[in-house]
Image (cartoon, grey):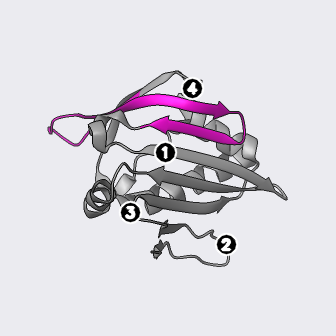
């Protein structure tokens, strides 16, 4: 049951792929031009994460982000768009293995919340980032996809690539 989306790529740009692997699983991959240490830090240090995570085209502002990035630690992101009611996303880190793996719950979805795992695999100074979402049901994954999450994910991964390129250059 593979359904696949991709960002556009050019000779200088990496491609992001989004694949539905099963009724409950979505996998996003992208090679980032930087070492795993920097890519992991971009995901695990709130002051860095805040600089690339929100898809710019969505008109959202990351109002606050708190994270205790360790197994058992909690995180909470709050977004707002203009005068609209803020939206909170929160959960708990299940696994934190520096430079190679992060895993967390997405508790704002209640029983429909997924478990997200991101791995970082370095090869020749570049890092393959694989984001794996395991949803509790087919319906929960279908609802996430219908909400328009995929275009935002593509944009966010492009922003991560650009952000890490700036870190590498500095």
Residue occupied by mark 2: 12
Residue located at (71% from left, 58% from top): 33
Dominant secondary structure of the residues highlighted in magenta in the image = strand
Count of all numbered marks drawn on residues in the image: 4
Q: Is residue 49 visible?
A: yes
Residue occupied by mark 1: 116
CA separation in Å, label 2 and label 1: 29 Å
Of badges 1 and 3, nearer the viewer stands 1
| Label 2: element kind | loop
Going from the N terminus, do you reach mark 1 or mark 3 first?
1
CA separation in Å, label 1 and label 4: 14 Å
Residue located at (56% from left, 35% from top): 48
Residue 20 lies in what quarter of the image?
bottom left
Category of crowding for the residue at label 2, using alpha-carbon neighbours closer than 10 angstroms: few (below 14), some (14–19), many (at least 20) = few
Position in image of residue 34 (x %, y %): 73, 52
CA separation in Å, label 1 and label 3: 15 Å
Residue 3 lies in what quarter of the image?
bottom left
Residue located at (67% from left, 72% from top): 12
Category of crowding for the residue at label 3, using alpha-carbon neighbours closer than 10 angstroms: few (below 14), some (14–19), many (at least 20) = some
Question: Which label sits on residue 69?
Answer: 4
Going from the N terminus, do you reach mark 4 or mark 3 first?
4
Residue occupied by mark 3: 150
Please say if the residues under marks 1 and 4 sit with CB atoms less than 8 Å apart.
no
| Magenta-drawn segment | 76-105
CA separation in Å, label 2 and label 4: 33 Å
């Amino acid at each position: 049951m593979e359904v696949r989306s991709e960002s556009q790529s050019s000779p200088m740009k990496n491609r992001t792929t989004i694949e539905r692997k099963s009724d409950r699983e979505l996998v996003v991959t992208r090679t980032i031009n930087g070492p795993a240490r920097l890519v992991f830090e971009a995901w695990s240090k709130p002051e860095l994460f805040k600089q690339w995570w929100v898809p710019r085209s969505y008109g959202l502002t990351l109002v606050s982000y708190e994270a205790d990035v360790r197994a058992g630690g909690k995180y909470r992101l709050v977004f707002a768009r203009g005068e609209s009611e803020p939206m909170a996303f929160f959960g708990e880190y299940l696994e934190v293995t520096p430079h190679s793996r992060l895993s967390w719950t997405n508790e704002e979805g209640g029983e429909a919340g997924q478990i997200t795992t991101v791995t970082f695999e370095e090869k020749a100074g570049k890092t393959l980032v694989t984001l794996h979402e395991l949803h509790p049901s087919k319906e929960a994954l279908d609802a996430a996809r219908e909400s328009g999450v995929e275009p935002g994910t593509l944009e966010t991964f492009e922003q991560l690539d650009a952000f890490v390129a700036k870190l590498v250059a500095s």
